[in-house]
Image (tube, coloured by chain):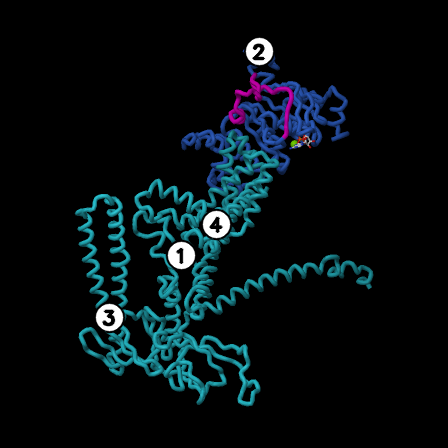
Amino acid sequence: MTHATENSSRPGDDRRADYIRIQDFSFYYGSKQALFDVTMDIPERQVTAFIGPSGCGKSTLLRNLNRMNDLIDGVRHEGDVLVNGESIYDPHIEVISLRKRIGMVFQKSNPFPKSIYENVVYPLRVAGQNTRSVLDETVERSLRGAALWDEAKDRLHESALSLSGGQMQRLCIARAIANRPEILLMDEPCSALDPIATVKVEELIHDLKREFTIVIVTHNMQQATRCSDRTALFYLGKLIEYADTQKIFSNPAQKQTEDYITGRFG
Amino acid sequence: MSAAKAPSLTKTHAAPGEPLVWLTAMGLALGLLMVAGLLGVIVANGVPVFWPAPLVEVTLKPGVQNPVPGGGETFVGRLVQQRVKRTPVLDAAGRPQADQSELQYFIGNKDGYGSNFVFINRADIAKTRTPKDILVIERMEYGPAFGFPQRLATSDGKTLSASDPAFPGALRALVAEGNARRRALETIEKRDIGRINAEMNELKIRGRDSSAPTKAMTALEARYETLASEARALRLLQTAATLTYQLPNGAVKELPIGNILGYYQPNQIGIFRKLGLFLHNIWNFLSQDPREANTEGGVFPAIFGTFVMTMLMSLAVVPFGVIAAIYLREYARQGFFVRAVRIAINNLAGVPSIVFGVFGLGFFVYFLGGSIDKTFFGDYLPTPTFGTGGILWAALTLALMTVPVVIVATEEAIAAVPRGMKEGSLACGASKWQTIQRIILPASLPGILTGLVLAMARGAGEVAPLMLVGVVKLAPSLPIDGEFPFLHPERKFMHLGFHIYDLGFQSPDSEAAKPMVFATTLLLILLVVALNLFAIVIRERLRKKYATGAF
Ligand SMILES: Nc1ncnc2c1ncn2[C@@H]1O[C@H](COP(=O)(O)OP(=O)(O)O)[C@@H](O)[C@H]1O
Ligand SMILES: [Mg+2]
């Protein structure tokens, strides 16, 4: 753990500052390059926000962290991504076990056409866990974690599709944390939500960071200031600036960052 | 004034292309009209078969030749249709007559008259009346008899005149008794003796080398003897009592009671009794075995055969189609080869069905069936077991024919599953197969069922390939029965589609069979509709369950 302490952001803290290590990472959709030589370290159990104008590659980078982009035909990458010191592209690592360690919440909420209960325990079921007591306990813990327990506890066996849009997104969060992943990836989780639901999800993010390393893509700069510790600004596939959120928004080092946060482009 | 200022707002009907709406609507209307017309023709021709229509006595004008032998100036029949003659009838002066219509009557009594139908010019008819006492007798042979009852000769040598008040009751009791005896006979001959025959065959094949009759064989033969003599006794009883009746042309006939299935007086019974008979006739048609080269009796074995064959086909076609579609959509690398395969599949759906029949005969029957026979049923050769047409081979042949439909429908359904749902499952750490099994397949079940509906609609109505791989005019036994192993996939079977063809084109008296053709067609349509409705109901239930939400 000597390595970890060396890289800690704050002395005396056991959280690794380079929990996720992205090294010279470039990514191509066919011949189109979407990311250019991105290098950054994402700290453990903190919230890191990716901001930037549409199409700058935020989702692409996020979806590479759990190798979701592997599903697309004709993609390739250069460079490497390490999670807790291990390369996710290591041929010995199975992509399924990687995804079990990394939960993901999508921009468009995507509950399965099953009951609320079955939605939450889905990650356990596919991992072969069918013990009733474990599943019950998981449902309660995850729904509480996603601040949905009070609303859903009496209708666990109703279809998830009967929930409202905000509830569905919180259900997806509950599902993403059900199997106690280490990392939680969120791709604009609030973009389809009303302001009240957005506040709930933001509070949730705040609570969840005690347990999870969170990477969140957001369009909304207020959201980034409200709930993230570190912020990375992307533009046209390049990482422009990456620093503590406070610093980015109060005293950006780059002219481009200042232009973006003051709304001069993007 | 304001209207003149803004004409474009009011003259919407002149918008470009708008009249085309009417054209498309007309296309739809035409299509619906054709369907309605088709169903109308079939219903109008098929339903009257079951209606107990009155019998009329026709008196001909003097000098007109009576088509019924020995009938004098009259004959009795049931009006079938009225039509205009194709070749005009001339009167004495050589001019065409005013009334050119001709009537077709069903005169029954084929054993007495030789033919079932007569045509008569309407102009030649002097008068008609409905004789009160005439009886329609449904019997085992020669179709119905029309006649006036005279007397009943019971087995104890007594006779009972038709004018005796006890006559109707006695006739009813005797006919009921005869029907019960016939059922008992059927049980003995079809089931019990059939079983013994099967056991004997088995024994013979196993003991082919040793010529000495074994103990088991003698026991079987003894059992056979008892049953056979039982049957003989019943048979004798069936002919012990007779009904004597007079045909409308004066001839007197005697009919063993055992040959009578039922009887009624069409000119006396009221509307409710007629309705009852109508329903009774329909029920008999649905539930009984055919008689007399399929032109009489029911079509139960054909309904059953069609149903079982379609079910077997569905059982075969769904797994094949779904697995192929999953592979094509989820696993195969999308490229030239997969595109070529897709085109080939689509073309397969357009191959004439008889080609599949030939393939089924060559591959399933001769090759697969022949090999099975050699390996497992060598003892029975040269009598083929699977090496001849059978319901299994027919179902597989049709499954092959309809599998493209299922593949295409399933592929579309899989493609319609939202990408987000697949990604959500994978992000939860599910493998590709788990995602297919738990998310994609349930969500595409409605689409798969749509494919099945289309496949059944095509498969249940197909006749040509079946003629090569196992359908027969008259099957001795059903493909599913109480005999172990209950489902007999090697058996030949009857099919409604083939039954229609057989009735209409292969029966000795196609004129008599024509109404049956329509009735059977109606039934085939109803069966296909029922199967489809069943699948559609399931699909709607699944749709509700797996609706993919508002997003
Ligand atoms: N599946 C894909 N195939 C090809 N190009 C893609 C695909 N997904 C995203 N891109 C391209 O990659 C770039 C980055 O996209 P994305 O990461 O979705 O941007 P962001 O999430 O920042 O809005 C965009 O130019 C987009 O057009
Ligand atoms: Mg995005």
Provide residue B419's location: percent of width, then percent of height: 58, 37
Marks counted in the figure total: 4
Residue designated by label 3: B239
Q: Quadrant of the C terminus of chain A?
A: top right
- Whether discs 3 and 2 lie on one chain: the answer is no
Chain letter of mark 2 equals A
Residue B17: quadrant of the picture? bottom right
Query: Which residue is under mark 4?
Result: B358
Label 1: which residue?
A: B472
Residue B479: where, in percent of width, then height?
36, 52
**What color was chain B assigned in the picture?**
cyan
Nearest to the eye among marks 3 and 4: give it: 4
Where does the image place residue A160, in percent across and percent down from the top left? 52, 40
Chain A tint as drawn: blue
Q: Are marks 3 and 2 in contact (CB under 8 Å)?
A: no
Between marks 1 and 2, how big is the CA–CA gap?
83 Å
Label disc, if present, on residue A3 of the rendered structure: 2
Vertically, is A1 above or below B339?
A: above
Nearer the observer: mark 3 or 2; the answer is 3
Residue A11 seen in this snapshot: yes
Q: CA distance from mark 4 to mark 1?
A: 16 Å
User: Does the magenta segment cover residue B490?
Assistant: no
